[in-house]
């Protein structure tokens, strides 16, 4: 009787382990499918912005990446989005320089030409949406 009980317990343990392995393999397959459905797209944009009446561009930056855009600013009007990477300011690379160090003074009325890189992930469960149409229209208008 005791032997039979041990045998049943071992069979039960084996069945549980098999089920756990099947579930883990299934979860891994689902993750792989999701990654395969995603595609990453990087677009490059050129926009021209002007300072507002207070001398601000309406951008909050972290290094050379846009963290936020003031809704009523010229930056928002031309389609700059949080997450955009500024890689050139008035023809000068931001590599090795900060965004703010390349800007003309706050009193300068000169327009500022920015080259941006925007990366989007499309498809899959972790999709990130961006308004490329608004940016395209803004670029055409500048």
Image (cartoon, rainbow, N blue to C red):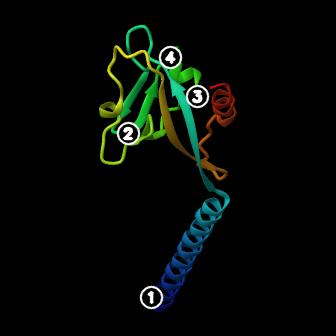
Upstream in the sequence, badge 4 or badge 3? 4
Are the two marked residues, 4 and 2, in contact with CB atoms closer than 8 angstroms?
no
Spot occupied by residue 29 in the image (x, y as percentages of width and height): 62, 69
Q: Which of marks 2 and 1 is nearer the N terminus?
A: 1
For label 3, the residue is 79
Q: Which dot marks residue 64? A: 2
Disc 4 from disc 2: Cα separation: 18 Å
Query: Which of the two discs, 3 and 1, labels the residue nearer the N terminus?
Result: 1
**Is label 4 or label 1 in front?**
4
Mark 2 or mark 3: which comes first in sequence? 2
**Most foreground residue, 69 or 94:** 94
Real-space CA distance between mark 2 and mark 3, rounded to the nearest whole angstrom: 17 Å
Q: How crowded is mark 2: few (under 14 residues within 10 Å), some or many (20 or more)?
A: many
With respect to residue 50, does 82 lie above or below? Answer: below
Residue 28: x and y in percent read 57, 68
Mark whose residue sits in front, 2 or 1: 2
Tell me: 49 left or right of 103: right
- Residue at 63% x, 56% y is 39
**Quick check: 98 above or below 15?**
above
Identify the residue under disc 4. Answer: 73
Q: Circle 4: is it few (<14), some (14-19), or many (20+) Cα within 10 Å?
A: some
Q: Look at mark 1 in the image and give the residue it sits on.
A: 2
Q: In this view, does 133 lie to the left or right of 75?
A: right
């Amino acid at each position: 009787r005791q032997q039979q009980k041990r045998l049943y317990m071992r069979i039960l343990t084996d069945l549980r382990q098999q089920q756990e392995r099947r579930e883990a393999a299934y979860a891994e397959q689902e993750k792989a499918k999701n990654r395969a459905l995603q595609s990453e797209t990087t677009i490059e944009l050129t926009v021209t912005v002007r300072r507002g009446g207070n001398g601000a561009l309406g951008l909050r930056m972290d290094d050379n990446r846009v963290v936020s855009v003031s809704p009523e600013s010229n930056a928002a009007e031309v389609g700059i989005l949080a997450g955009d990477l500024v890689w050139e300011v008035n023809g000068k690379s931001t590599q090795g320089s900060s965004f703010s160090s390349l800007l003309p003074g706050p009193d300068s009325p000169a327009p500022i030409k920015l080259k941006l890189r925007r990366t989007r992930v499309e498809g899959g469960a972790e999709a990130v949406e961006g308004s490329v149409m608004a940016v395209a229209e803004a670029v055409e208008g500048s």
